[in-house]
Amino acid sequence: MGPRLTSLILKEFIQFSRNRVVLVLILFLYTGEVVNCTVALSNDIKHLLLTVLDFDRTPESRNLERSFFAGEEFKLAAHSASEAEAGDMLQSGRASLALIIPTGFARELAQGAPSSIQILLDGTNSNTAAIARGYALGVVDRFERRSLANIAGTPAAVVQPVLRVWYNPDLTFTRFMVLSMIAAAALMVGVIQPAASIVHERELGTIEQLMVTPITTGELFLAKTLPTLLTGLLAVFPSLLIAWWFGVPLRGSLLLFVALTALFLLSAIGIGVLIAAVARTLQQALLLAFFGLFPVMFLSGTFVPIKSMPDFLQKSSLLSPVRYYTDIILGIFLKGAGFAELWPQTFALLAIGSVLFSCSLLMFRRN
Amino acid sequence: MNPLRIGAVIAKEARELWRDPVTVGISLLMPLVMLFLFGYAVTLDINNVALGVLDRDATPASRSLTDSFVRSGYFRLAQVFDSTHDIDAALQRGSVDLALVIPERFQATIARGEAPSVQLLLDGTYSDTAQVVAGYADTIVRSYGRVPAGHVRVEMRVWYNAEMRSANYVVPGLFAVILMAFPPLLTALAIVREKETGAIQQVLASPLMASEFIAGKLIPYGAVAFIQILMVMAAGFFWFDIPFRGNAAFLLLAGSIYVLCTVGLGLLISTMARRQVTALLLAMILTLMPSMLFSGFVFPIFTMPYLLQLYTFAFPARYFVEVSRGIVLKGSGPGELWPNIMMLVAYTAIVFVIAAARLRKKVA
């Protein structure tokens, strides 16, 4: 590394560190936002608000009601006195389900005749509703088997499943969220920072001054991308502390994690430089970054599991570097996977990264 | 405030916007991209789960259990194992999501009238997916060979979204997200841009009043927001077939208050940032991310810890998500939604008061 390159890189670092607000915001993305999301977001649906309308008022109907509140799935919103009141509760959002037990429920149950109950479900949030429906049917199923067992000696089930969950035994969302938010922060910083720094210099016209100096385009390119790569890597460490604080185990190699994070940042920086090459003003660059980040992020599986996406989106997710990086961090942290398991993702990341990076170098040269 | 001078600023801003095809293109295209990604993808339904089987029994009964997984439509048989060791490797690589282990003498045990246990090994890394898979697998195994009792009939009636389509739920919520993504960012950039180039000094030196300058900056981007919302509504109702049960005029009225609030936030951000990069990062942290994550748009608020439920009140998107879903899906009117509307109005007023105070301090 010649002294020319060193001083150029030094200049970039000084410029970078002068913008304190941006540094603080980057740090916030890597720490505060990771904590917020991890604590807040989950699809573990619990304490669904249920209103009960019991026309039967018998020990059996109260028994059924109790079995709804035996677990953590449901919470009693209030008892309703009429169907209209139950309807109002759903309309205003004070309850998301209503259980209606008709008169004669206990009598029919004792006679062995099929008795029916009604459940009204607020379907507004289709995901929550689907889960709520599953819970409700499960509760009724268990109630039914219990009361059947009292009547006759019918066996509860033919085959007993024993479920064991690996890598994340409590099936909490926390571990996934912490790790995928780290990926999100790395992506945002990796794309926005180089794009902004290059276009800003072009808008000020100082890039022309740099061009007439003996500095080569390659050197300039390196100087523009290196600070982002280094901050991106350094900023990962506070996030690791947070992950540790949330009890996320690091079962694999830290070195492999850092190396592959660097590889991932190269893809992100590649996108950033490409944007800088296309944009004429800083505003355009920032909007393009925003526009580009969204689908790349979306197709990573952070918001929506990739397995639930329609086919064409699942296929397009193969182009998103974040998808591979998410696989990699989850693999290294939770499964203790090493290069032997992660080489397909690593090569995919390498391929995407080198295409993006060489394109961006070419565009950078041409400009 | 002189309307003529405001008009001049609007005309200047509109011309700048018109000359910038990238900004216009992104403002018009991006909401549709967001709509299509979210509209098609936000669901927790899962199919094509990769199943691996270790069948130690190899009898008609054990094969029929494996079959009932495949026939359910949720699973595909990805791998047949010979030993437990293979299962380890496959889960680690991620080539199967769920491994089913059927013990020896499975058929014989059933024939004796006892209940054999089968083991399900599940990869829990993607916890969302894993929970759904666990539910499916559990149901399939429990219902194997059992005659449905049908003793208590459950009559399930789903209100507001009878087919439980995720698009019905996502699209009205997306109005709130899109309006939080663009207007604040565009307004903030429009003002900070002038600061960065120094042009704002000339503006302040001219007879133009600060309030006129601001109004001229806010109105064009408010208009852009309206075009966006109309586009997204049209695409939502005609392409995704979202039912519209409420009053369109009421939705537009609530939407206008919300748009005012979003451009106000943009103004507030512009008083905090001296550079456009800062403005972008601030907009992402203060408007875009909360509107997607902490508004109940995808992740339900009632599952959050109490303190963070309070935190969601700090962002206006949550009020509008409820208003928009209430009007579109439930046909709610002002009678049910007034608390949210009042919160939006109050919020907007506070945002403008703070922004004005910060601006005055700068000028003085």
Image: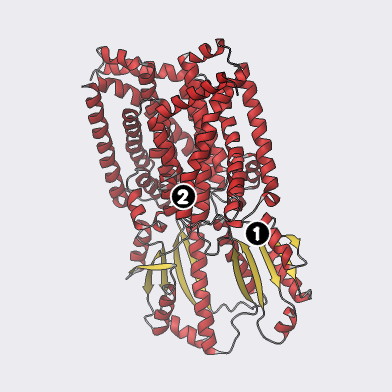
The residue that disc 2 covers is A241
For the view shown, which residue lies furthest in the top direction? A212
* Mark 2 burial class by Cα count in 10 Å: few <14, some 14-19, many 20+: few
Q: Quadrant of the N terminus of chain A?
A: top right
**Residue B223 drawn above or below residue A4:** below
Q: Does the CB distance between marks 1 and 2 fall below 8 Å? A: no
Q: Amino acid at mark 1?
A: Asp
* Mark 1 burial class by Cα count in 10 Å: few <14, some 14-19, many 20+: many
Q: Quadrant of residue B45?
A: bottom right
Number of the label disc, if any, that sits on residue B97: 1
User: Which element carries disc 2, helix, strand or loop?
Assistant: helix
User: In x, y percent, where is residue B359?
Assistant: 26, 26
Q: Is residue B180 visible?
A: no
Q: Is residue B305 visible?
A: yes
Give the chain of mark 1: B
For the view shown, which residue lies furthest in the left direction? B364
Residue at image x 47%, y 46%? A239
Residue at image x 30%, y 23%? B214
Say which of A204 and B310 sits in front: A204
